[in-house]
Image: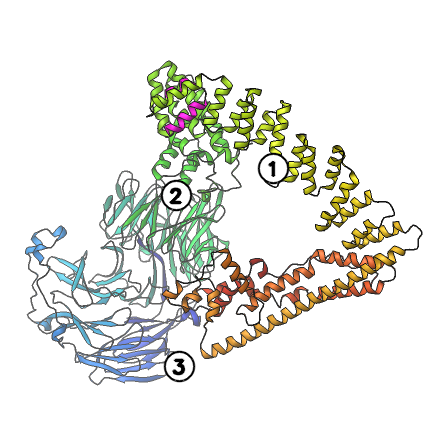
C-alpha cells in the first residue's frame, strides 16, 4: 500500500560531461567534507559537494581507457582498472599513484565485493581472476569452464508442468514448450560481460555469452570457485543485478510475446519473473541496479528519443512500478545512475547527465490517503489502485477500484475534495472519487517540465505547492493550472514539506542543511512569504505532519527522523519507530513488534499491544479500526481498545447510548464504562439511557455487568484523566451497584405506559437481584401474579435463571409470606412431603416465635434474637442458651435493655465469656453491671488497674489499706515502681520510707530526691545522704560500665567487619588472577535455591535436594547458623552487620539519651557530684561521636542497599556483584540501611 515519494531532488553542476561512473566518499560524515568522484573514459575528477557556488572540478588522475573504478574506504584510495591491464591506486588527497597489479592480456571489467575484501577481474581473454584486497590471486579460470559432475542439475521427474497451476495463463500454458533453442550464431549477440556481487560478498555472478548457449551467467564464491551455472534460457540480456539480501538474481529476458525481468535463485534455477510495460527489442535495458536495502529495483532503458529509469518495488508477490524518470535526448541525455550505499542513504539515487549535471534523488515510502476518508491510493505504473477500507478490506495487489491512465503515474496529491495525479510526462490529472471521474487538468509549462518537482502538495482550493532545488538553494513554487503563479527562494535543500489540515494559507518546510523549520504563508496579494519558525530540530526528518485541533489551532509538529526517532514539537518521544499516524487526540506508532498509543493532550503513553513483527500502519478506518500492512504485503485490520474507548467516549459525551452499547457488545468491553465515563451525567440522563436502549435484554446485560469498581480508573484508565473525573456528590464507588440499580428501578417503576411497563419487567427483576434485594424482587413478581398468574410464573422462571432455587426458597421463607413460599416451591423440584409439614408447623406457632424459628432456620441469628426478645419472659432460658451458642452478647444487650433482670444475667454471662478469653478489663466492667462486685474486683486486680481496684473494694466494703498493700508486689514485678510509690504514698504514714524505697528500686532518682526532701523536715538531708546518694552513685557506676561494655563491643564488631572485608577483597583479587570466580560450597548452601550462583555450581540432581527451611524449627536453626558471630562463619560479615545495627540502635536510641540526661540531673541535685555528672556526660558524648553518619558509612556501604542490580543483566554477568547481592539479601531489609539516630537536646550546659 506504500508509494515511492520523491523527498527531494537536488541539482548540482559538475562541469564534467560524459561521465561513466560515480564514486561516493563513504565517511564524509566523519570528515565533515563531502566529495564526489566522477570517472570518464580517461579521467577521474573530484567534485566538491559542499561548495556554495560552482567550482571547477579537480583532476585526480588521467589514465587511458578506464574500465572500472572503486573508492577503497580503508585505504582512502581510488582503485582504477584500465583496458590495457593496469590496476592503479590513487591517493585522492596527494594524487600519488602506485601500481596495484597488472594483467598483460588486458581487463574488460572490474568489480569489488561490497566489503572490499575481494576483487573480481574479467580479462579480455574471458578469464575470471579473483584477488584479495592486497592483490594476491585466489583463483583464475575461463568463463566457459564447466561444472563438475556432482554440481550439475539432476532432473528426477518431479513437478511435471502438466500438473501445475498456471494462473491466468490457463491450461494452455501446460502445453507450451519451454525447451531451450541454442542460437545459430552467438557472435551476433552483444558480447558485453557484467559482474554482480551479492550483498554479503560471499558470491558473485558473471553475465556473459557462452558458446552454443548464448547469454547466461555463472555463480562463483568469494574464493573464485565456480559453484553454479545458470539454467539455459533463450532471450536473456546482458544486464545483471544480484539483490543485496541474496535471494534473487535479476536479468532482463525477451520471451515470446512479452518482455520480462527474470529472477533466478543462487543455484541458477529460475524462480519467477515480472512483466515489463515496454518491449525490450524497442526499449532495451542498459543497466539493472538494486537499492542497498533491496527495496527498490531500478531499470535504465534507452531509445533513440529518450532514456528512462523505472523504479519497481514488490509487495505481496506483486511488482509495482512506482516511478518513471524520463530524460529526453534532445535536451540532456542520461549518462549513468548509481544507488547510494552509505548507511541511512539507501534510497538515494544519483543521476549524472551527459552535460555534467548531477541530480541527487532522495526517495521515501509513504501512504497516500485522502484526508477525512479511509481511501488509500496505490501507484502501479499507469494504474491507480483505490481501496476504501470502510467498504471492504481488499488485499493487494487487488483493489476496490482501478483508474487507468495513458502515462505512468509518479505522484498522488490528495485533498479533501479531489485527487491530483502527476505523471511521468509532467501532466496533472484530477480525479473525483465520488463519481469515479478523471479529467485532464493541465500540463506543466516548458520551464517547469524540465525540472524534477518534489513534495507536491495541495494548497488551498486551487493551488499546488512544489519544490525545486538547484545547488544550495530551493525554490518554493506555487502552481495554478500548470503555470507558475509565484515562488519563494530560500537557502538550502528542502527535505520535507507539510500543509496543516484545514489550512489554506500556510505550510511548513525543513531544510536539509540546518534542520530549521520554516513557516511559509500565502499573503492576501498572492505572494509566498517565508518566516523562520522557532522550532529547531536536531536531525533531518523523513516525514512530518502539522497536526492541528480546534483547541490547538497553532498545531503540533510530529516528525519521524531518518534514525527512526519520533519527535513531537522537537522532543523525542520514541525510538526505533517504523510508522505513525494520528487518530483524534492519539498519536499511534509502530515499532518492530509493538503498537503504541500516546495521548497528545498531555504526551502520556496510554497503551501498548503486540503486533506481527515488521507490521506498519497504513491508515485509520471507520469504526475505530487500524489497517496494518505486514512485511510480506498482506493486510490486517485491528480495533485497538484505546480507539474503541475513545469512540465510545465521544458518543457518550453527545448523549448517545445506543452506538456505545453496540460497540461494547461487539468488542467485548465491560459495560461499566457507560456510567463510569461520566457518572454525574449518567445519573442525570438515566431516562435517556432507557429510552434509547429499547431492547430489554441489553438493559439486563448492562445491569448484570455492574461492579463496585470505577473502570475509568482501573481497567480502562489509560483513556481517562483522573483529574477530570468528577463523580456526583455523596457518591461512593463501593456503593455504585446499589446506587445505579436504585436509579434504574425508580425510573422504570415510575412509568405509566403499559408498553414501557412490559419492557421493563425483566430489567427491574435483574436490578433487584444485582442490588441483592431478592425479597423486593419476589414481592414485585407476587404483585404481578395477583393480576396474571401466567405472567407471574414467567417472571419467576426468569428469576430462577438468575438465582439458585434453594436460595430463592429461603429468601421467600424470610419474607414470612407463606403464599410466596408456596409459589416458589411449586416452581422448584422440591418434594411437597418435605416442605408442607414444615410450613404447617410454622403456621401453628405464635407470630413472633414463628419468625424466630424461621430466622433461626435461615441462620439470621440477629433477627431471630430480636423476635425472641419480643416473646417475653417465658423464653428467657432459651434466649440465654441461644445467646451463648451463637455469641450474640452485644446484640442481646441492646435487645433486652428494657428487661432489667434478664439484662443483668446477660451481662454476667458475657463477662464469663470475656474472662475465659483473657479479656479481664471488659469482664470487670460487665461484672460490675451485672452486680457481681467480687468478680469485678478479682478481674480488676488481675489487670493491676489499682484505681479501679480501690473503687470496687470501697463499694464492696473491703479494707482499702490491705487491698493496696496486696497490689504493691505485683506492681513491682511489672516494673511499675511509680504506681507502687503512688499507692504506698496514699496509705502509708507521712514519715514512712517505703515510698522512697520504691523510687530507689525503680531508679527514679529525680522523684526520690524530691521525696527525701519532704521526709527530712529538719533540713539535715540525712535521707538524701544515707539512702539516695549511695544508690545513685552505685547506679551511675553500673550505667558507665554498661555504656563502656556496649561501646567496646561496637568497636570490636566494627574492626572485625573491616578485617573481613579487607580479606575478601584480597581473596577476590587473587581469584581474578587465577580465573576462578567460584563460591564456597558451604556458602552456596545457604543461598536461595533459585539463585543463578547456586544453580551454576550444582548439577540438576543435587539442586533438587536444596533446603527450603519450611518448618519453624529448621528456620530458627537456619537463622542461628546464619547470624552466628563465631569467627570463621562463612556469613560472619552478615552476622556482624546485624549485631552492629542492634548495638547502634541500643546506644543511640532516644530512651538512652533521656536516661543519661535524667541521671546527670540527679547528680547535679546532690551538689557534690558535679564532676561525676560531667564524667558521665563526656562518656556518652564520646559514644555518640563514634556513631556519626560518616563513621556508620564505613559499615553500611551503598552496595548493601541493592545498588548493584545493573550489573546482574546482560551477556557479561558480574558474578562478584551477583554473589554480593545474594549475600546481602539474607540481611533483614531494615538492617541493610544504617540506623537513623534522632539526637535530642540531652546535654546539660553547666557541665564541662
Nearer to the camera, 910 or 270: 910
* Numbered disc 2: secondary structure: helix
Q: Which residue is mark 2?
A: 641
Question: Real-space Cα distance between discs 2 and 3?
Answer: 64 Å
Q: Is residue 1087 above or below residue 713?
A: below
Q: Which of the two discs, 3 and 1, labels the residue nearer the N terminus?
A: 3
Was residue 540 drawn as part of the magenta stretch in this picture? no
| Whether label 2 touches label 3, CB < 8 Å | no
Residue 300 horizontal/vertical position (percent): 24, 63
At label 2, counting other C-alpha atoms closer than 10 Å, the crowd grade (few under 14, some 14-19, many 20 or more) is many
Of circles 2 and 1, which is in front?
1
Q: Quadrant of the C terminus?
A: bottom right
| Whether label 2 touches label 1, CB < 8 Å | no
Colouring used for the render: rainbow
* Span highlighted in magenta in the image: 803-823
Q: Which of the two discs, 2 and 3, labels the residue nearer the N terminus?
A: 3
- Residue at 84% from the left image edge and 57% from the top image edge: 1027
Q: Is residue 431 visible?
A: yes
531 left or right, relative to 793: right
Of circles 2 and 3, which is in front?
2
Nearer to the camera, 766 or 628: 766
Which secondary structure class fits the magenta region best?
A: helix
Indicate which disc residue 450 carries: none
Of circles 3 and 1, which is in front?
1
Q: Which residue is mark 1?
A: 914
Nearer to the camera, 1175 or 201: 1175
* Numbered disc 3: secondary structure: loop
Q: Which residue is mark 3?
A: 94
Q: Which of the two discs, 2 and 1, labels the residue nearer the N terminus?
A: 2
* Numbered disc 1: secondary structure: helix
710 left or right, relative to 272: right
Amino acid at each position: 500500500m506504500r508509494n515511492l515519494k520523491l523527498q527531494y531532488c537536488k541539482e548540482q553542476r559538475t562541469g564534467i560531461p560524459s561521465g561513466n561512473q560515480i564514486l561516493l566518499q563513504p565517511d564524509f560524515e566523519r570528515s565533515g567534507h563531502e566529495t564526489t568522484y566522477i570517472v570518464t573514459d580517461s579521467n577521474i575528477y573530484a567534485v566538491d559537494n559542499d561548495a556554495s557556488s560552482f567550482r571547477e572540478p579537480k583532476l585526480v588522475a588521467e589514465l587511458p581507457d578506464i574500465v572500472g573504478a572503486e573508492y577503497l574506504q580503508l585505504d582512502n584510495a581510488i582503485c582504477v582498472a584500465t583496458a590495457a591491464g593496469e590496476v592503479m591506486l590513487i591517493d585522492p588527497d596527494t594524487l600519488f599513484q602506485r601500481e596495484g597489479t597488472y594483467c598483460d592480456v588486458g581487463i574488460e571489467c572490474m568489480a569489488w565485493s561490497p566489503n572490499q575484501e575481494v576483487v573480481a577481474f574479467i580479462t579480455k581473454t574471458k578469464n575470471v581472476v579473483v584477488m584479495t584486497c592486497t592483490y594476491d590471486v585466489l583463483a583464475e579460470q575461463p568463463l566457459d569452464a564447466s561444472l563438475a559432475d556432482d554440481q550439475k542439475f539432476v532432473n528426477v521427474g518431479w513437478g511435471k508442468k502438466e500438473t501445475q497451476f498456471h494462473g491466468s495463463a490457463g491450461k494452455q500454458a501446460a502445453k507450451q514448450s519451454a525447451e531451450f533453442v541454442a542460437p545459430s550464431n552467438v557472435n551476433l549477440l552483444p558480447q558485453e560481460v557484467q559482474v554482480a556481487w551479492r550483498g554479503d560478498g560471499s558470491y558473485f555472478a558473471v553475465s556473459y555469452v557462452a558458446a552454443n548457449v548464448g547469454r547466461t551467467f555463472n555463480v562463483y564464491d568469494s574464493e573464485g570457485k565456480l559453484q553454479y551455472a545458470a539454467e539455459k534460457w533463450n532471450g536473456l540480456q546482458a544486464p545483471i543485478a544480484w539483490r543485496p539480501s541474496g535471494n534473487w538474481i535479476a536479468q532482463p529476458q525477451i520471451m515470446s510475446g512479452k518482455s520480462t525481468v527474470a529472477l533466478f535463485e543462487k543455484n541458477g534455477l529460475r524462480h519467477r519473473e515480472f512483466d515489463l510495460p515496454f518491449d525490450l527489442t524497442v526499449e532495451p535495458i542498459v543497466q539493472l541496479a538494486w537499492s542497498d536495502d533491496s527495496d527498490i529495483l531500478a531499470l535504465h532503458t534507452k531509445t533513440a528519443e529518450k532514456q528512462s529509469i523505472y523504479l519497481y518495488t514488490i509487495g505481496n508477490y506483486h511488482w509495482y512500478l512506482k516511478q518513471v524518470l524520463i530524460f529526453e535526448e534532445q535536451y540532456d541525455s542520461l549518462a549513468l545512475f548509481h544507488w547510494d550505499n552509505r548507511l541511512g542513504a539507501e534510497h538515494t539515487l544519483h543521476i549524472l547527465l551527459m552535460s555534467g549535471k548531477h541530480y541527487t534523488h532522495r526517495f521515501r515510502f509513504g501512504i497516500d490517503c485522502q484526508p477525512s476518508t479511509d481511501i488509500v491510493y496505490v501507484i502501479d505504473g499507469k494504474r491507480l489502485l483505490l481501496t476504501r477500507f470502510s467498504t471492504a478490506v481488499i488485499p493487494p495487489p487487488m483493489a476496490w477500484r482501478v483508474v487507468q491512465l495513458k502515462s505512468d503515474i509518479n505522484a498522488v496529491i490528495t485533498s479533501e475534495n479531489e485527487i491530483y495525479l502527476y505523471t511521468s510526462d509532467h501532466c496533472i490529472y484530477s480525479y473525483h472519487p465520488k463519481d469515479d471521474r478523471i479529467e485532464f487538468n493541465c500540463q506543466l509549462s516548458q520551464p517547469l517540465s524540465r525540472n524534477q518537482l518534489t513534495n507536491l502538495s495541495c494548497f488551498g482550493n486551487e493551488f499546488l505547492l512544489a519544490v525545486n532545488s538547484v545547488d544550495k538553494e530551493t525554490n518554493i513554487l506555487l502552481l495554478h493550472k500548470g503555470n507558475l503563479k509565484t515562488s519563494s527562494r530560500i537557502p538550502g535543500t528542502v527535505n520535507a514539506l507539510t500543509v496543516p489540515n484545514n489550512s489554506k494559507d500556510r505550510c511548513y518546510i525543513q531544510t536539509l542543511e540546518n534542520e530549521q523549520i520554516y513557516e511559509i504563508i500565502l499573503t492576501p496579494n498572492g505572494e509566498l512569504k517565508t518566516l523562520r519558525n522557532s522550532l529547531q530540530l536536531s536531525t533531518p526528518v523523513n516525514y512530518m505532519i502539522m497536526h492541528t485541533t480546534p483547541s490547538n489551532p497553532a498545531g503540533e509538529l510530529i516528525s519521524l527522523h531518518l534514525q527512526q526517532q519520533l519527535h513531537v514539537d522537537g522532543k523525542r518521544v520514541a525510538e526505533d519507530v517504523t510508522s505513525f499516524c494520528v487518530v483524534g487526540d492519539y498519536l499511534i506508532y509502530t515499532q518492530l513488534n509493538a503498537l503504541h498509543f500516546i495521548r497528545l493532550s498531555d504526551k502520556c503513553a496510554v497503551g501498548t499491544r503486540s503486533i506481527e513483527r515488521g507490521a506498519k500502519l497504513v491508515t485509520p478506518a471507520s469504526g475505530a479500526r487500524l489497517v496494518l500492512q505486514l512485511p510480506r504485503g498482506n493486510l490486517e485490520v485491528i480495533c485497538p481498545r484505546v480507539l474503541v474507548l475513545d469512540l465510545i467516549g465521544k458518543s457518550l459525551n453527545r448523549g448517545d447510548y445506543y452506538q456505545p452499547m453496540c460497540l461494547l457488545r461487539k468488542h467485548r468491553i465491560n459495560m461499566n464504562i457507560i456510567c463510569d465515563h461520566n457518572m454525574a451525567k449518567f445519573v442525570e440522563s438515566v431516562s435517556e439511557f432507557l429510552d434509547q436502549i429499547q431492547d430489554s435484554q441489553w438493559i439486563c446485560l448492562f445491569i448484570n455487568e455492574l461492579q463496585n469498581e470505577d473502570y475509568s480508573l482501573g481497567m480502562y484508565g489509560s483513556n481517562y484523566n483522573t483529574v477530570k473525573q468528577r463523580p456526583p456528590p455523596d457518591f461512593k464507588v463501593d456503593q455504585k451497584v446499589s446506587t445505579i440499580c436504585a436509579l434504574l428501578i425508580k425510573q422504570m417503576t415510575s412509568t405509566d405506559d403499559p408498553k414501557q411497563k412490559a419492557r421493563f419487567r425483566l430489567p427491574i427483576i435483574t436490578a433487584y437481584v444485582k442490588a441483592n434485594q431478592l425479597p423486593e424482587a419476589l414481592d414485585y413478581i407476587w404483585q404481578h401474579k395477583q393480576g396474571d398468574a401466567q405472567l407471574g410464573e414467567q417472571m419467576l422462571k426468569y428469576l430462577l435463571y438468575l438465582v439458585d432455587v434453594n436460595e430463592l426458597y429461603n429468601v421467600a421463607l424470610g419474607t414470612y409470606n407463606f403464599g410466596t413460599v408456596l409459589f416458589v416451591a411449586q416452581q422448584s423440584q422440591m418434594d411437597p412431603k418435605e416442605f408442607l409439614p414444615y410450613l404447617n408447623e410454622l403456621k401453628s406457632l405464635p407470630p413472633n416465635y414463628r419468625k424466630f424459628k424461621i430466622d433461626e432456620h435461615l441462620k439470621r441469628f440477629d433477627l431471630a434474637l430480636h423476635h425472641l426478645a419480643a416473646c417475653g419472659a417465658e423464653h428467657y432460658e432459651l434466649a440465654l442458651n441461644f445467646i451463648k451458642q451463637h455469641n450474640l452478647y452485644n446484640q442481646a444487650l441492646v435487645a433486652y435493655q428494657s428487661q432489667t433482670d434478664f439484662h443483668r444475667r446477660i451481662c454476667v454471662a458475657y463477662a464469663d465469656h470475656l474472662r475465659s478469653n483473657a479479656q479481664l478489663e471488659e469482664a470487670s466492667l460487665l461484672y460490675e453491671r451485672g452486680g457481681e462486685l467480687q468478680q469485678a474486683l478479682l478481674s480488676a486486680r488481675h489487670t493491676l488497674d489499682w484505681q479501679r481496684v480501690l473503687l470496687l473494694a470501697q463499694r464492696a466494703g473491703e479494707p482499702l489499706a490491705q487491698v493496696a498493700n496486696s497490689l504493691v508486689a505485683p506492681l513491682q514485678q511489672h516494673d511499675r515502681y511509680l504506681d507502687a510509690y503512688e499507692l504506698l504514698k496514699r496509705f502509708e504514714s507521712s514519715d514512712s520510707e517505703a515510698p522512697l524505697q520504691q523510687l530507689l528500686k525503680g531508679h527514679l532518682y529525680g522523684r526520690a530526691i524530691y521525696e527525701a526532701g519532704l521526709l527530712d523536715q529538719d533540713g539535715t538531708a540525712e535521707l538524701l545522704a544515707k539512702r539516695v546518694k549511695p544508690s545513685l552513685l552505685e547506679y551511675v557506676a553500673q550505667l558507665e560500665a554498661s555504656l563502656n561494655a556496649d561501646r567496646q563491643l561496637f568497636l570490636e564488631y566494627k574492626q572485625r567487619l573491616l578485617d573481613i572485608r579487607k580479606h575478601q577483597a584480597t581473596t577476590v583479587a587473587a581469584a581474578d588472577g587465577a580465573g576462578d570466580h567460584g563460591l564456597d560450597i558451604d556458602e552456596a548452601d545457604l543461598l536461595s535455591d533459585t539463585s543463578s550462583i547456586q544453580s551454576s555450581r550444582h548439577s540438576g540432581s543435587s539442586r533438587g535436594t536444596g533446603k527450603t527451611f519450611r518448618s519453624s524449627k529448621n528456620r530458627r536453626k537456619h537463622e542461628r547458623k546464619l547470624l552466628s558471630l563465631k569467627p570463621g562463619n562463612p556469613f560472619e560479615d552478615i552476622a556482624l552487620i546485624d549485631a552492629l545495627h542492634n548495638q547502634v540502635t541500643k546506644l543511640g536510641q532516644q530512651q538512652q539519651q533521656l536516661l543519661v540526661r535524667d541521671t546527670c540531673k540527679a547528680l547535679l541535685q546532690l551538689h557534690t557530684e558535679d564532676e561525676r555528672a560531667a564524667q558521665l556526660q563526656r562518656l556518652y558524648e564520646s559514644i555518640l561521636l563514634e556513631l556519626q553518619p560518616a563513621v556508620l558509612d564505613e559499615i553500611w556501604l551503598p552496595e548493601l542497599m541493592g545498588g548493584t542490580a545493573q550489573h546482574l543483566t546482560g551477556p557479561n554477568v558480574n558474578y562478584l556483584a551477583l554473589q554480593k547481592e545474594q549475600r546481602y539479601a539474607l540481611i533483614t531489609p531494615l538492617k541493610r540501611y544504617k540506623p537513623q539516630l534522632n539526637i535530642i537536646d540531652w546535654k546539660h550546659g553547666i557541665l564541662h
